[in-house]
Amino acid sequence: MAAEPGKPTAAWKQRPEGGNRAMIRLILGIARGGGRGLARLCLYPIVAYFLCMRGAERRASRSWLSRVRGRRASLWQVARHIHTFSATILDRVFLLGGRMEVFDIDVHGLEHLEALLDQGRGALLFGSHLGSFDALRVLSRRRPGLQVRIVLDRGQNPVLTEVFDSLDPALAAGVIDGALPGPAIALEIQHALQQGALVALLVDRVHGHEETVAVPFLGHPARLPLTPWRLALALHAPVLLCFGLYRGGNRYELCFEPFLDPVATPPPGREGRAEWLRQQVAAYAARLEHYARGAEYNWFNFFDFWNDDDASLPTGAAAPAAGPAAGMRDRAAGSR
């Protein structure tokens, strides 16, 4: 199916960043000086701010919760949703700062990842804006020396990015810059995989002029990007899904699933390739739905996932001119 013209940027990327440098640094100072318990008290005025001043996010939260729960969400449930999001952002201070002892992280499926690492192979970790990707920090304790490279759009939340970079300069130095041209990003990812690194991407949002495919998600068609799957196919890289779910208090659940074997190849021909890619995205959407239904307050896409301007971005797959690097300039992970 041929690509249709798309808009220059997705509407969610044009939303202003919440908070300012002074407020964020104040909370950071409280967290460092008073600990996690005291800092969590700051979450209540933050929730109140979003409820009162950020109508788009409030409406998106209610729409999501109503859809996933099958009935209209209450304002209290919206507040809980925003509080869950704020709590995971605060916890990045401690996760990136190496304070793993304050968390209880239950890990599932790690054996699939370790099997690859024991062979010296790199892998793509496909995550989403469901829960906290930063729970991956637990791997540094279990696998000292493990390289984790993140594809990150630093310009999306510049204030938060600056603060979090200061907490973990080593991780920041390994970021694959999403501002590079698409082919350069693909080459960086390929080089990292050859060195046995894990390369993490968030693959649930559409960026820029990326091509998309419509797949079922919570009973309705949703458009998801094709770029990550083309990249995995071109690089012959194993793909694992990763979900870091916040379970309240200091508890996280980190789940790994093997998803795509590098020996998997699509049928010959343009139509066969397009259908194969659609099947991979649809299977991913099914797993995303599975985890989202079990952790509905962890959904951190605060926009209309089905009817946002993302839906009007290019549609289709596997046009000969659309190589694996197409769309990589806007592909980002780790930003909120």
Image (spheres, helix red, strand yellow):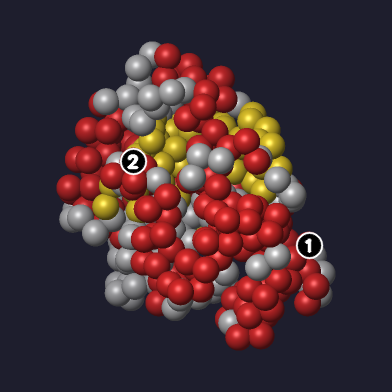
Task: Please indicate, yes or no, whether residue 261 appears anywhere in the rendered image.
Answer: yes
Quarter of the figure with residue 268: top left
* Identity, as a three-letter code, of the amino acid under mark 2: Ala
Instruction: Assess disc 1: are there few (<14), some (14-19) or many (≥20) residues with their C-alpha within 10 Å of its C-alpha.
Output: few
Q: Is residue 336 left or right of residue 6?
A: right
Q: Is residue 285 left or right of residue 194?
A: right
Q: Secondary structure at mark 2?
A: helix
Eyeballing the image, is 200 above or below 53?
A: above
Question: Which residue is nearer to you in this view: 125 or 27?
Answer: 27
Count of marks, rendered view: 2
Q: Secondary structure at mark 1?
A: helix
Instruction: Assess disc 2: are there few (<14), some (14-19) or many (≥20) residues with their C-alpha within 10 Å of its C-alpha.
Output: few
To which residue does mark 1 refer? 69
- Write the residue at 43% across / 63% down: 160
2 or 1: tag closer to the N-terminus? 1
- Write the residue at 51% across / 27% down: 141
Eyeballing the image, is 31 above or below 250?
A: below
Eyeballing the image, is 87 above or below 25?
A: above
> x, y (%) of residue 327?
28, 57
Q: CA distance from mark 2 to mark 1?
A: 41 Å
To which residue does mark 2 refer? 170
- Write the residue at 27% across / 25% down: 195
Question: Which residue is nearer to you in this view: 185 or 197?
Answer: 197
Task: Please indicate, yes or no, whether residue 323 appears anywhere in the rendered image.
Answer: no
Eyeballing the image, is 148 above or below 117?
A: below
